[in-house]
């Protein structure tokens, strides 16, 4: 989100934006109540959509917030509205931004590459596309794979066309995603060959997998109507690991992201290579900071859960 005045850049600091699975009813409420800038952006995004983002975020149900067409714009609105408050109140911006899955959209909005209203509409449409793909070809399932190496998980998935690695979240912590039968087959293959633990995720679809293939054209059609600009703040892609500002890279990776893995390990390693020492996670905060600490134990991780946290971090 660009302004005429340029905020001060926080050297060695990256802002992080979480993705689907991090949502909770009431996320960001303390900022909404205390910061007029946050409240104003929520109101603007409410008027841009045919759903009541504010009510869903603060008064909705857990079940409602698991629907991709609801979760995605609500998560985006929370992150962008708090970012708007931070930049307005503390006059700062990060050296780099990054987001996990849906958070990649929030990062682009924060970086000024796409307007908040357009981003909210796009993520709402993206969620609808994913729901349609799940209804047609899924729903499928997602399972966290713990203790197995990256190579072991990749080899196990290579035997199936209906399963892929959805997330590389941390060393020896991946998520596989695909058809229920395919994921079960890969689980059995890994269990036979490695020391491994599994945890089935409570999700409504097999995200970042071949099950989402029919959503690609749908999302690309929605993206064709969106104006993407050169980002004011460089973004680290959660798909390619590339540091970029060009709209062409955003379009490519946001499309690839639908059926490809989110590589959060690569994101954090690239951020460290770029000199990032401090990671500030925006609401709903906590998940990404935990992953960063597992990848880079010496990193300084800060979570924004209340306005008081922001005062401590930025004042």
Image (spheres, helix red, strand yellow):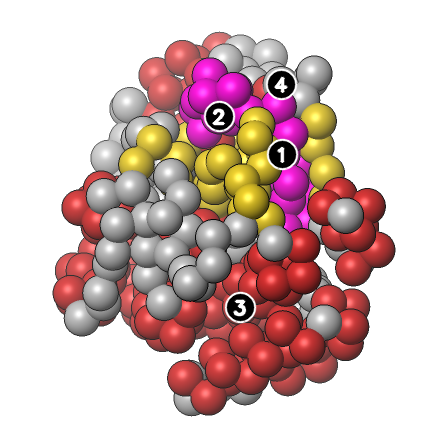
Of 198 and 295, which appears nearest the observer?
295
Looking at the rendering, the stretch of residues picked out in magenta corresponds to 265-293
Residue marked by disc 1: 279
Helix, strand or loop for disc 2:
helix
Q: Residue at (49%, 73%) from the top-left corner?
A: 70
Residue marked by disc 4: 296
Helix, strand or loop for disc 1:
strand
- State whether residue 143 appears in this view: no
**On screen, residue 178 above or below 140:** above
Q: CA distance from mark 4 to mark 3?
A: 28 Å
Which callout, 3 or 1, points to the residue nearer the camera?
A: 1
Precedes in sequence: disc 4 or disc 1:
1
Of 109 and 17, which appears nearest the observer?
109
Which labelled disc corresponds to residue 77? Answer: 3
Precedes in sequence: disc 4 or disc 3:
3
Q: CA distance from mark 3 to mark 1?
A: 20 Å
- State whether residue 295 appears in this view: yes
**On screen, residue 312 above or below 109:** above
Which labelled disc corresponds to residue 315? Answer: none
Q: CA distance from mark 4 to mark 1?
A: 11 Å
Q: Quadrant of residue 63?
A: bottom right
Precedes in sequence: disc 4 or disc 2:
2
Residue marked by disc 2: 271
Precedes in sequence: disc 1 or disc 2:
2
């Amino acid at each position: 989100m660009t302004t005429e005045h340029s905020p001060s850049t926080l050297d060695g600091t990256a802002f992080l934006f979480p993705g689907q699975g991090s949502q909770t009813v009431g996320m960001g409420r303390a900022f909404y109540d205390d910061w007029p800038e946050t409240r104003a952006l929520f109101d603007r995004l409410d008027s841009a959509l045919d759903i009541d983002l504010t009510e869903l975020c603060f008064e909705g149900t857990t079940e409602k917030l698991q629907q991709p067409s609801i979760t995605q714009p609500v998560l985006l609105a929370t992150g962008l509205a708090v970012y708007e408050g931070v930049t307005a109140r503390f006059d700062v911006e990060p050296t780099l931004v990054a987001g996990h899955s849906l958070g990649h959209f929030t990062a682009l909005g924060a970086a000024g590459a796409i307007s908040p209203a357009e981003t909210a509409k796009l993520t709402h449409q993206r969620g609808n596309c994913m729901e349609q793909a799940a209804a047609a070809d899924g729903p499928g399932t997602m399972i966290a794979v713990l203790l197995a190496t990256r190579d072991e998980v990749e080899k196990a998935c290579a035997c199936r066309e209906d399963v892929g690695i959805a997330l590389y979240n941390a060393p020896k912590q991946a998520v596989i995603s695909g058809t229920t039968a395919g994921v079960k087959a890969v689980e059995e293959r890994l269990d036979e060959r490695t020391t491994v633990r599994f945890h089935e995720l409570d999700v409504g679809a097999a995200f970042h997998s071949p099950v989402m293939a029919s959503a690609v054209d749908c999302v690309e059609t929605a993206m064709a109507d969106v104006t993407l600009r050169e980002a004011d703040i460089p973004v680290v892609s959660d798909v390619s690991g590339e540091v970029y500002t060009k709209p062409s890279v955003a379009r490519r990776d946001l499309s690839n992201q639908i059926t490809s893995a989110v590589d959060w390990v690569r994101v954090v390693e690239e951020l460290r290579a770029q000199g990032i020492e401090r990671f500030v996670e925006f609401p709903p905060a906590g998940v990404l900071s935990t992953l960063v600490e597992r990848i880079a134990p010496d990193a300084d991780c800060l979570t924004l859960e209340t306005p008081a946290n922001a005062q401590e971090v930025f004042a």
